[in-house]
Image (cartoon, rainbow, N blue to C red):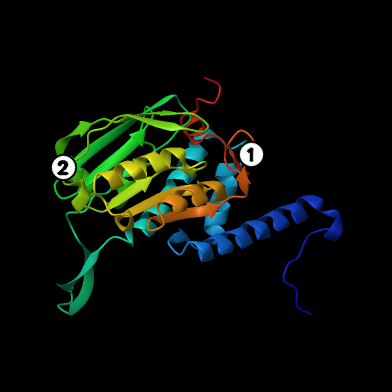
Amino acid sequence: MYVDVIIPRGGENHVAIDLIVQHIRTKLGQQNLCKIYPNLNVILSTFQIRGMHTLIRDKEIAKHDFVFYSDRLIRLVVEHGLGYLPFTEKQVITPTWHTRDELQQVLSILSAAMLNSAVNHLEYLVILFQDQCTLELISARNYVVYPLFEVERAWRTHYVHAVKELKLEKSSSTAQLIYEKLPKDISQRHVLLLDPVLATGNSAIQAIGLLVRKGVPESQIIFLNLISAPEGIHRVYKQFPSLKIVTSEIDVALNDEFHVVPGMGDFGDRYFGTDDV
């Protein structure tokens, strides 16, 4: 006898059945969107990744656990996104004196991080490094860029330039650019754009549009996030079809308040424990 799914207590276990149905619908939605948009990439869902999603989505999880597992997931998404940056062949000699052909990341790229949160204004910081730079759209703290530095330590140790700012005003339906000052050679670099959640896509479209107007080709922008809503994906790709999106999960939809459902709540508030502030 062969079975695909085993449900404890069978048809009486309505909670388990609802969870399985929701998971199957989500996976079918992901596959359809990936067929529509070939530059949309959902990282491979393993038991480990599903387990971390279970934890960060749980409203009862402790703050320090939410931070720990969010950082782990962010790092996995960043690692995946870095694989789309340009590499070149390099020959190395191993400690056993064997020659081996490997790959080396091409320098003179731009690594950009856009971080959103539910606040009235956001700051856009540009931190320049020796051969790369990091752009960061943040409110108060850079909760997504730390895992990026953990993955690429050279970007932190070769810091040589200063911080510059950009501000956005954001509401449920619009995002207005107020001020920007970006590196002069930004058009010659690749960009990593980071945001914990892609919901409506309003802020993302503003940030991507800014980069494109500065001369960055769409194909050289990689947008990384933990969770994406189908509505946000459609809006972003309607304007920027050559952009790459890397996410760990595509959720069901946006609700009437423009929140991703089932989602994980306000990422910034949960990360910093400011839910009740």
Question: Is residue 229 among the parts visible in the rendering?
Answer: no
> Residue 216: x percent and y percent?
26, 50
Up/down of 177 relative to 103, above or below: above
Is 247 placed left or right of 113 in the picture? Answer: right
> Residue 74: x percent and y percent?
42, 48
Q: Residues within 10 Å of mark 1 (few under 14, many from 20)?
A: few
Q: Amino acid at mark 1?
A: Asn
> Residue 187: x percent and y percent?
21, 49
Question: Is residue 81 among the parts visible in the rendering?
Answer: yes
Furthest residue in direction right, as rendered: 12
Q: Nearer the viewer, residue 167 or 47?
A: 167
Please name the residue that numbered disc 1 is placed on.
255
Sequence-wise, which precedes: disc 2 or disc 1?
2
Up/down of 24 relative to 276, above or below: below
Q: Nearer the viewer, residue 16 or 94?
A: 16
Q: Residues within 10 Å of mark 2 (few under 14, many from 20)?
A: few
> Residue 83: x percent and y percent?
33, 62
Secondary structure of the residue carrying numbered label 1? loop
The dot on residue 58 is none
Picture quadrant of residue 168: top left
Quarter of the image with the N terminus is bottom right
Q: Amino acid at mark 2?
A: Lys
Please name the residue that numbered disc 2 is placed on.
184
Instruction: Kindly report the distance in space between the C-alpha atoms of the residues bearing marks 2 and 1.
Output: 40 Å
Circle count: 2
Up/down of 1 relative to 51, above or below: below
Identify the residue shown where x is 51% and y is 41%: 200
Secondary structure of the residue carrying numbered label 2? loop
Q: Nearer the viewer, residue 54 or 162?
A: 162
